[in-house]
Amino acid sequence: MSTKHPKHPRSHPHPDPHPCITTPLTADLIRGALELERTDHGVLPHRLPARARAQCTDPQLAMVESQPSGVRLVFRTRATAVELDALPTKREYVGAPPRPDGVYELLVDGVLTGRGSVPTGNTVTVDMAAGTAEYQPGEPGTVRFTDLPDTPKTVEIWLPHNETTELVALRTDAPVEPAPDQGRRVWLHHGSSISHGSDGAGPTTIWPVLAASLGGVELINLGLGGSALLDPFTARAMRDTPADLISVKIGINLVNHDVMRLRAFTSAVHGFLDTIRDGHPTAPLLVVSPILCPIHEDTPGPSAPDFTDLAKGYLRFRALGDPADEATGKLTLRVIREELSRIVTQRAPDDPNLHHLDGRALYGEPEATAHPLPDDLHPDAATHRRIGERFAELTFTADAPFAAS
């Protein structure tokens, strides 16, 4: 995947009529989603299936699983113009500057060729201080990519990783057909907002997508912002999803939501891994502990946003727990890393394809010195690249857990 000199296509609420071939948005054109929901407007990709969604009414989970991180349209065509009508759902925060529109990125034969946004759409206005949200319906818009080479090619449109996106229509000026299976291994990954892509620059530069590109694998990204909580329904979704390689990045959400203590954590991790193994008994399974996060290394959760500089566009997080409570079983990142290492060591004799990666190998003290977490919780765009490159180096190369046979 290259990111050299991309063109920046325009977004139009009313498209130019020249691309006149409309292709139905079917599952054989969409990768990275576990389920497609038919809506009044078109198709809504989901990253958790309906059964899982029915077992949790948390609005945070509903929002993040419908944000199509890692989801893309992939097809073969010789079209020189491609238009995608979409209905995004945007978020606005009371007291904060407007958020940028979600980014759509177009790749031609693996090379980043265009970027665009849809400025229209639904709006959810969130008052974080009051804990309320107000929904306002809006209209679909269009992102258009032109001047593509008039040759047969594989086109990918990566959807915004942080903006719920209903797909309304795909139009081209030449016929479209599904891209053939290249025989690449499928990597199924689950994690928190960092895996989801929080503060990443675009859908192809968040760390799991970068790592997948470097590793030559097909990604299914179940990074769920604020929702990597060892939920059994997520484990069952992973159990039932075909995959060749599996990783679970566990820890930060359990601390910053303060959802359990060490006794419950240990059994929950075993249960989560047992469920995945029910569907994937021999696939390489990598357990990744949290990256360095100084506010929670030795201080339990919960964590809370600091709104002091919100009007200037700065949001920070702070830990509210008491370090002394670690003695009573409250979780810190240090405790979680030690316990995950112990669990993998305990299980490994009966599960030779189970592996462990200390998250500080991806982002530790040297990286924190060079690139501190801007809000004390999430990495910036440059750090996403560092984590993605480091993950690929540690997992996809020779003798690593995900090395090709």
Image (cartoon, rainbow, N blue to C red):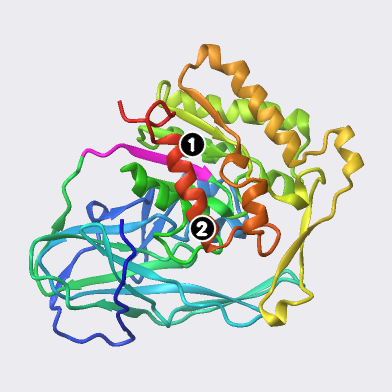
Residue appearing at x 60%, y 35% in the figure? 358
Residue 224 in view in this figure = no
Magenta segment: does it hold 49?
A: no
Q: Left or right of 128: which side holds 17?
A: left
The disc at residue 197 is 2
Q: Is residue 138 above or below residue 368?
A: below
Front-most of 151 and 391?
Answer: 391
Classify mark 1: helix, strand or loop.
strand
Residue 280 in the image: state x and y as whole percent: 41, 26
Q: Position of residue 24 (x, y in %)?
A: 20, 64
Q: Amino acid at mark 1?
A: Ser
Q: Residues within 10 Å of mark 1 (few under 14, many from 20)?
A: many
Residue occupying image coordinates x 39% and y 77%: 117
In the image, farthest residue toward the top: 349
- Residue 343 versus residue 52: which sits nearer the camera? 343
Q: Quadrant of the N terminus?
A: bottom left
Residue located farthest toward the right when viewing the structure as drawn:
324
Q: Which amino acid is tagged 2? A: Gly
**CA–CA distance in space, label 1 to label 2:** 16 Å
Q: Residue 188 magenta-drawn?
A: yes
Span shown in magenta = 183-190
Query: Which circle's residue, 1 or 2, is located before the other in the chain?
Result: 2
Q: How many marks?
A: 2
Residue at which label 1 appears: 247
Residue 39, quarter of the rendered image: bottom left
Task: Tell me the SS state at disc 2.
Answer: loop
